[in-house]
Amino acid sequence: MTAGDDVDYYGLDELLGEEERLTRATVRSFVEREAAPLVTACHAREEFPRALIPRMAELGLFGAHLKGYGCAGMSAVAYGLVCQELEACDSGLRSMVSVQGSLAMYAIHRWGSEEQKRRWLPPMAAGRVIGCFGLTEPDHGSDPGSMETRARRDGAGWVLTGTKRWITNGSIADVAVVWAKDDDGVVRGFLVEAGTPGFAARDIKGKFSLRASITSELVLEDVRVPAESLLPEARGLSGPFSCLNQARYGIVWGALGAARTCYLTALAYARERRQFDRPLAGFQLVQQKLVHMLTEITKGQLLAWRLGRLKDAGTVRPEQVSLAKRNNVQIALDAARLARDLLGANGIVDAYPVIRHLLNLETVSTYEGTHDMHTLIVGRDITGLDAVR
């Protein structure tokens, strides 16, 4: 083994605790033995490998970073390593776990009543109940404040009307966290159970990205929900934004997993593939690309680790998460594109995972805040000024 084989050029393992290394090894073994053999076929068929859900639950991956209610209570760094190993296989795996835990479960854990927490979180942690998170709308992605979904008071309950789009887990979810504006224009969160009259989830097909992931449109046509479906502690956009920040943190680590797979695939290919009577790895331009990939991955690893320690200490700021999401997804995209280039024509076939990761990362770059939106978030933080539109 040479220095590049384990993608730990700066000895990051020395910065991890024993439990964190064990978590990573356990999830990596699960991915290699159980998930990886299924992903290529699931990608081709546009389906999520649902058979893996019980095993994910058994490993404590749902709501892994949450405490109590049957959740594993992992450190932020350990949870980050979970996301890294899942996305090293496919972004769809990490997305499913992220939406279940960091969006749906976190919304209930952070903003729900004690009764809601006791009802929903244990079965969600056990994988018996699947959740989704309804914020994005057909005409409102980066600007959720302009959402059109409405929640109208009706006696003791509420009536929800609107459409949500690009919703991971939508059609398999037993409960949806739906964000809507009330009669006063205040954003509120509601727990809508599958099967409620007027509520439907329709899968979006024809995707070239995140094909091994369920993506749906939620339609709410005068959906009547009881008063106890309201998340009582959430008022305004701070509710959904706090959830998005949890999901963005997982992406910071997950993108590194995708980048690692692309880099290792390109490295192995460059060593084995011969052109002009020598391995590709023996050419200057090839080495330059490999070194660039390794350098950026190493910087991203250190950025993710420091962010995780800040999160564990309770001192992390949303803007710091934005900087890391922006950086790590971009370097992962760069790594995937360089790996595709190094593999030549072989880079576009599913015999190698590179093109699948490249396509997936195009979506990862868009959801939970685009590269440009996170640029503006960090820009406002360091200047104190909103950028002129």
Image (spheres, rainbow, N blue to C red):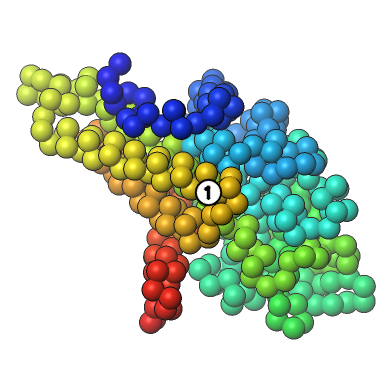
Q: Is residue 60 left or right of residue 146?
A: right
Rendered image quadrant of residue 274: top left
Rendered image quadrant of residue 259: top left
Q: How many marks?
A: 1
For the point 37% across and 29% down, the residue is: 11
Q: Where is residue 63 in the image (x, y as percent from the top left)?
A: 68, 42
Q: Residue furthest top?
A: 1
Q: Which of 8 and 43 is in front in this view?
A: 8
Q: Is residue 186 above or below residue 347?
A: below
For the point 53% across and 67% down, the residue is: 141
Q: In this view, does 313 lie to the left or right of 389?
A: right
Q: Which of 217 and 363 is in front in this view?
A: 363
Q: Name the residue under label 1.
A: 310
Q: In this view, does 236 lie above or below 6?
A: below
Is residue 367 something one can see in this rendering? no
> Amino acid under label 1?
Leu
The quadrant of the image that shows the N terminus is top left
Q: Is residue 30 left or right of residue 289?
A: right
Q: Nearer the viewer, residue 184 or 42?
A: 184
For the point 11% across and 29% down, the residue is: 283
Kind of element beneath mark 1: helix
Q: Position of residue 287 (x, y in %)?
A: 17, 32
Q: Nearer the viewer, residue 338 or 115?
A: 115
For the point 28% across and 23% down, the residue is: 3
Around disc 1, counting alpha carbons within 10 Å, would you say few (fewer than 14), some (14 to 19), or many (20 or more)? some
Is residue 1 something one can see in this rendering? yes
